[in-house]
Image (cartoon, helix red, strand yellow):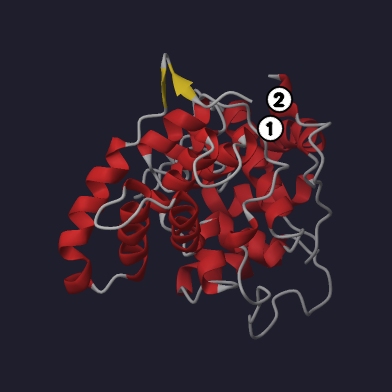
Amino acid sequence: MAPLSTGRSPVPHWPILLLALSLMAGTAAAGNDTAALIAEAARYEHGEGMPRDPAQAAALYCQAARLGAADAQYALGWMAANGRGMPRDDAVAWRLFSAAADQGHAQAARLAQALPPRQDVPLPACMAPDLPLQVDLDPDPWAGPARAADYPPASAPVRRIVERLAPVYEVDPELAMAVIAVESGFRANAVSPKNAQGLMQLIPATAQRFRVADPFDPESNVRGGLAYLRQLLALFDGDVRLVAAAYNAGEGAVLRHRGVPPYRETRDYVTRIARLYSLPVHRYYRSSSNDPLSKR
């Protein structure tokens, strides 16, 4: 497996070095745990005031990446892509670049596009939370009897798209319909204050990550949203509570809080999904043998 490169040289890493130099100047005053971890990792990586130790750098980047720091996810992805301080692994690099890209990291998004998508590959073990993820919603929105969702007639064209595409991505069409209903109310031209776009409200970084050229095209948007849902289902072992929370707040927030984040918006979002989708657990896949993205 050759190192990820752009032309003749390995992936450029100077942005992380510049970031580290700025963080070293302001870390103590800021008191930011992730900034301190990234700054220390960069010192080990580049031998700034200490012997170079790529393995220790990777371990520190991974701690910050687990806390949801996009810069650390990018840095660790670069190390995986180039075999620095950890085994060279393009699949793991893609997962890390994609995680950072989903938070709007532009350089990570460009590098993720240079690698084949591998949603089936888990993130590095060091990014797993120390404790099991908790789902402390009270009352439990799935505790009552199952309810049939009642969607407006205007949703019929969207349902036809969803029922055709969802099986390809191994996502229950009813879960996708619930997400679309809550995200956009079935409006293909919907735009949020955070610039999330289309039926499944993809932010530009997520649209780019899943190769959605036109987020306002209903079919393209649904494909991107289904690909993201499938990735979250695999990451959170099919727990719909955590998947819904991650779709709203980001997977980094769920991992950082070891469960549904304590944000009112996210908790209300999970409850709204539960009102439309009656199953708290969804089957999920780990194999790449049926990965539609790899065939596009």
Q: Tell me if 104 is positioned left or right of 291 in this view.
A: left
Q: Position of residue 16 (x, y in %)?
A: 31, 44
| Residue 201 makes an appearance in the image | no
Type of the residue with mark 2: Ser
Residue 235, relative to residue 137: is it above or below? Answer: above
* Numbered disc in front, either 2 or 1: 2
Answer few, some or many: residues within 10 Å of disc 2's Cα (few below 14, many 20 plus, some between 14 and 19).
few
| Residue 258 makes an appearance in the image | yes
The residue labelled by disc 2 is: 294
For residue 30, the mark is none
Q: Of the residues under marks 2 and 1, which one precedes in the sequence? A: 1
- For mark 1, give the secondary structure: helix
Residue at 41% across, 28% down: 11
- Alpha carbons under labels 2 and 1: distance apart: 27 Å
Residue 202, relative to residue 251: is it above or below? Answer: above
Q: Position of residue 206 (x, y in %)?
A: 50, 39
Most extreme residue toward the front is 51
Most extreme residue toward the top is 7
Q: Position of residue 130 (x, y in %)?
A: 61, 74
- Judging depth in this view, the residue of 59 and 124 nearest the camera is 59
Residue 258, relative to residue 5: is it above or below? Answer: below
Residue at 56% across, 48% down: 185
Q: Position of residue 4 (x, y in %)?
A: 51, 26
Residue at 43% across, 37% down: 108
- Judging depth in this view, the residue of 61 and 287 nearest the camera is 61
Quarter of the image for the N terminus: give it.
top right
The residue labelled by disc 1 is: 157
- For mark 2, give the secondary structure: helix
- Judging depth in this view, the residue of 137 and 30 nearest the camera is 30
Q: Tell me if 178 is positioned left or right of 203 in this view.
A: right
Type of the residue with mark 1: Pro
Q: Tell me if 88 is positioned left or right of 85 in this view.
A: right
